[in-house]
Amino acid sequence: MAQSPQLKQSSPTSPDPQDFRLDATPAMRADNVVSGEHWRIGLITDSLVRFEWSDSGVFENRPTQTVLNRDFGSPVERRVTERDGRVIIDTAALTIVYDQQPFSKEGLSAVVKGVADTQFNTWHYGDAQRGNLKGTARTLDEADGAIELDNGVISRDGWAVIDDSAANIIIETDTVNGKANPFGTWVSPRATAETDLYFFGYGHRYIEAVRDFYRLTGPTPLLPRFAMGNWWSRYYRYTQDGYLALMDRFKREGIPFTTSVIDMDWHRVDDVDPKYGSGWTGYSWNRELFPDPPAFLADLHRRGLRTTLNVHPRDGVRAFEDAYPEVAKRVGIDPATEENVEFDLTNPDFVDAYFDMHHRMEAEGVDFWWLDWQQGGVTRQKGLDPLWMLNHMHYLDSGRGGNWPLTFSRYAGPGSHRYPVGFSGDTIVTWESLAFQPQFTATASNIGYGWWSHDIGGHMFGYRNEELEARWYQLGAFSPINRLHSSNSPFSGKEPWNFNRDVSAAMVDALRLRHAMMPYLYTMNYRAAEAGRPLVEPMYWQNPDTPDAYEVPDEFRFGTELVVAPIVSPDDAAACRGRADAWLPQGEWFDFFDGRRYVSSDAAGRRLEVWRSLDRTPVFAKAGAIVPLQDVAESGEAINSIANPQALRVLVFPGADGSFVMREDRGTWGAPSADTAIAFTWGGADASPSAFTVAPVTGDTSAVPELRDWTVVFRGVAPVDAASGVRAWSGEAPVEATVAYDEATMSLTVSVTGISSAASLRIEIPGGLRIADNPVESDATDLLLHAQMLYRTKELALQAVHKLGIGAIGALRTMNRGPRYANDFWITDMPDAVAGALEEILLRS
């Protein structure tokens, strides 16, 4: 049975050129090219076109920093005609008109077919991308709220353009600048200047556009399982014993973590002689704080934690560093001179010595690196961004010898998804920062960047607001990566026990939920790598022609089964609940936590306000959704485990049939997966049987436990008549099932134990399941009980709900009566927020 991704097996060795060779098909198919002496139009698909102009008549066929694959394996059907000196290329998706002259607005255009709701579906060379739905940005450093984003590859106008003209090319070469190149490949400026554009004319076929962007630039890699869990990070001057004690307290408190992020104080900072500059860059352990680094890293591994260290590499390697003598010699410097070894990514001697220095620390137990580059985009090579080069080389180097490649760094432009995980920068601790984060995350998928890691809870400046922290933790549970972070201020620690009881409980629940979702998250990790579908997607991806889908920037799809509408503003003081503006696509939806049904009957979907108390965030499961979870230990050694679980808890939502294939593996890079097909047959309202089935595992069966316990939670259903019973079989053999019902979450729970992974499982409800009735009065009572408002108004509101049902909506808005005489205690005052929250309850279904 697979236990965890393999640890890095590192030793200082010369690089293997095979580790740095890219899997690419950079040359376009000759039969998909229309060209002249100075121009070339490459039809990569009927919607994706490469436009090139070269004064020299020389065109680039090699990979660039962004583009790896220009041959998608099949010819593109088109009709090419020439009229009045203009070439007209007609494909199923586009009509291109070109005058065969240097590119100009007048001479080059493309019309995107099938875009009915825009007058801007014609692109002329040089046009501003006004309808672009945007992509992402390099960093959120010092951003207090929304910032301008770079363009993505999808647009409401139906077209988007990526300009690759300035990108360096990736070449195979034995030498670089007269020096031996041990890496086999390198990055070089283009020999001749040319215009090199990629035109995405996919109309509103957003999912297809992003998938083809991945085909063009390379897929998102599969992440190791531990990356799906909770990451602990803080810019703080920890000691070795203090840090381990903190990790042990987390375990005692029942708070799981999988990754330790050690910020810059692991290395020497304050005791660096000023003659060398600041201690911001460092590669030598601070032995006063961490006297035994190998033992420290081994102790973290024994606690089930992988470790990344923060580095700011800009200042190179200076004479106070432990590794300085060796690095200096490697680049031709006499160590006795104490001359600084410049950080120079254009010098292969330095890059080789630089990685050798990292390998020595990896051999001590460092699992991957947090590359905290903040110093701009200039190297000695024209057009080469040092951040891109760091990401590219570090990621490829981390996979040497069959290790699972991983790095942690900022975004460096289109194609950066090849080097996960992304670090979004130092977040300001404000509601404004939280409010922008869901939109920032979802929109990044428009440029294929699906694995952002934010400073959950906020990093610096700002203010203390306990409710803000709870809501941020809840967003973190439904973020691509959940990494907590804070500054070294004595007041900014994000440990849940630093907050009041209700906030602390919400934080712990969010962290435990994140760890419980590991089976679901890891399956979505496979989906991202193989199907080109990021974990977090904007709502308009699947509903591109529905205007309301564009009006909920904070809302997003979270994998195949869920929609999340996080609360990103303070709770209303009267309602004691937070509000999110949501849009639900057509169909039936269920609250993930309590099973309440929401009906969206119109083809255009449904806009609504959703209100939630501090203990939960709005998450909706589609009818027929299947969400596999794992049990999380209450405390102790097993709490951080990322092993493929022996005990599974599967949430199943009624109203439609559903299916889900859970993906697992043995935790080694490139290993085959073990696939478990799960299905739900709803049965419907005609009392047909409802059934939950699990097929025998396929693929690498040795990766999963031989026997598993299954707890199936049918959420949002009515109680089952005891006479009809619940039956279960493993293969053909009946098995005993434990059945329970929870009124609060309207959940029927069926548990079976010791089921062979090689056998099928079937749980059947012969009389069928029924969707639970909307508990209007009990939910209204609970809301009014806690609302901070006049008792008289509460009483009248509940009476209206009881007598009028949905008809109470009109009455709620009229419950405002001021005093009519002295000592008139019969006044009423209905807060708008309370009325809105009651309306949600009345209108759910």
Image (cartoon, rainbow, N blue to C red):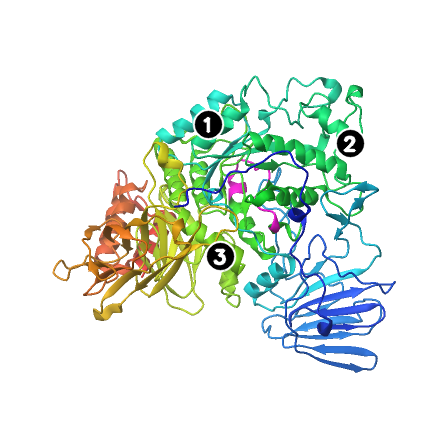
Q: CA distance from mark 1 to mark 2?
A: 35 Å
- Which residue is at the far right? 56
What percent of the width, then of the height, locates residue 256?
40, 36
Q: Nearer the viewer, residue 129 or 705?
A: 705
Q: Which residues are magenta?
A: 418-434
Mark 1: amino acid: Asp
- Please name the residue that numbered disc 1 is placed on: 299
Question: Could you say whether the residue bearing mark 2 is in a helix, strand or loop?
Answer: loop
Question: Which residue occupies 60% across, 39% down?
Answer: 425
Mark nearest the camera among 2 and 3 is: 2
Depicted 174 relative to depicted 258: above or below: below
Image coordinates for residue 58, horizontal then vertical, percent: 84, 63
Compared with residue 483, is residue 728 higher up or lower down, i.e. above or below? below
Q: Which residue is mark 3?
A: 527
Residue 729 located within the stretch drawn in magenta: no
Please tell me how crowded label 3 is: few (under 14), some (14-19), or many (20+) other residues with Cα within 10 Å: some
For disc 2, the neighbor class at 10 Å (few under 14, some 14 to 19, many from 20) is some
In depth, the one of 129 and 756 nearer the eye is 756
Residue with the mark numbered 2:
331
Q: Is residue 421 magenta?
A: yes
Viewer-closest of 540 and 288: 288
CB under 8 Å between callouts 2 and 3?
no
Residue 423 visible within the image: no
